[in-house]
Image: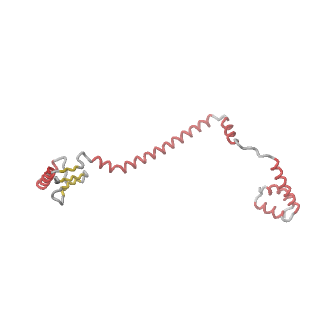
């Protein structure tokens, strides 16, 4: 067990909780049995409270800005200024690469997603979708049907006609589909 002389030297640190855990336990155990050391500890507590009450706390308003202003006025070595400048430039270039990479990724993604639509648009000519109504259209349909049935190479010779099939369930309506150009033509006779 520790003597009062050893414990007395640790009482101030005990009051401020600055001892190691095993030392705190040893002092607390001693204080539970020694009235003399307990009285000294009470005096330390009273003295600390009295000192705190008579001193006014300084105002800290504007303290941090004053310190920063004073640090900014200190002369900086040339190499330090150059290093800071280069670090700032490297940071801005790095962010530029990041933005450029993001823009490139978006451009590539846009190209990938829009390519089928662009091809479809490019393959459409001025003759892409046509609707003709009238008696002349019915006659033209009959001529195309007869030409397709009698001479299959007619479409090969005509640069504007590429007929894959001619279909219609109703004899008064003809539907012509050309899938490579995504074109459908519907012929209707004159309606009374």
Q: Quadrant of the C terminus?
A: bottom left
* Vertical comparison of 9 with 76: above or below: below
Percent across and percent down for residue 102 are 45, 47
Nearest to the observer: residue 88 or residue 188: 188
- 105 lies left or right of 45: left
- 51 lies left or right of 158: right
Say which residue appears at 80% left-offset and 56% top-offset: 15
Question: Where on the picture, by quarter, is residue 7?
Answer: bottom right
* Vertical comparison of 88 with 33: above or below: above
The residue most toward the right is 36
Question: Where on the picture, by quarter, is residue 77?
Answer: top right
Say which residue appears at 68% left-offset and 42% top-offset: 64
Nearest to the observer: residue 15 or residue 129: 129
The residue most toward the front is 192
The residue most toward the left is 150
Percent across and percent down for residue 69 are 67, 37
Say which residue appears at 17% left-offset and 59% top-offset: 170
Percent across and percent down for residue 33 are 85, 65
Say which residue appears at 48% left-offset and 43% top-offset: 97
């Amino acid at each position: 067990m520790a003597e009062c002389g050893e414990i007395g030297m640790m009482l101030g640190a005990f009051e401020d909780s600055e001892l190691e855990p095993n030392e705190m336990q040893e002092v607390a155990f001693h204080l539970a049995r020694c009235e003399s050391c307990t009285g000294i500890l009470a005096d330390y507590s009273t003295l600390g409270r009295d000192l705190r009450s008579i001193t006014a706390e300084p105002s800290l308003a504007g303290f941090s800005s004053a310190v920063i202003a004073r640090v900014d006025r200190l002369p900086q070595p040339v190499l330090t200024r150059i290093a800071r400048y280069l670090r700032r430039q490297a940071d801005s270039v790095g962010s530029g690469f990041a933005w450029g990479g993001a823009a490139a990724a978006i451009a590539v993604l846009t190209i990938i997603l829009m390519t089928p639509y662009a091809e479809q648009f490019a393959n459409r000519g001025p003759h892409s979708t046509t609707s003709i109504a009238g008696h002349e259209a019915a006659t033209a349909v009959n001529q195309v049907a007869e030409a397709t049935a009698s001479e299959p190479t007619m479409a090969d010779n005509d640069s504007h006609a590429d007929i894959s099939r001619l279909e219609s369930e109703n004899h008064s309506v003809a539907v012509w589909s050309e899938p490579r150009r995504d074109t459908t033509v519907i012929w209707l006779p004159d309606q009374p």
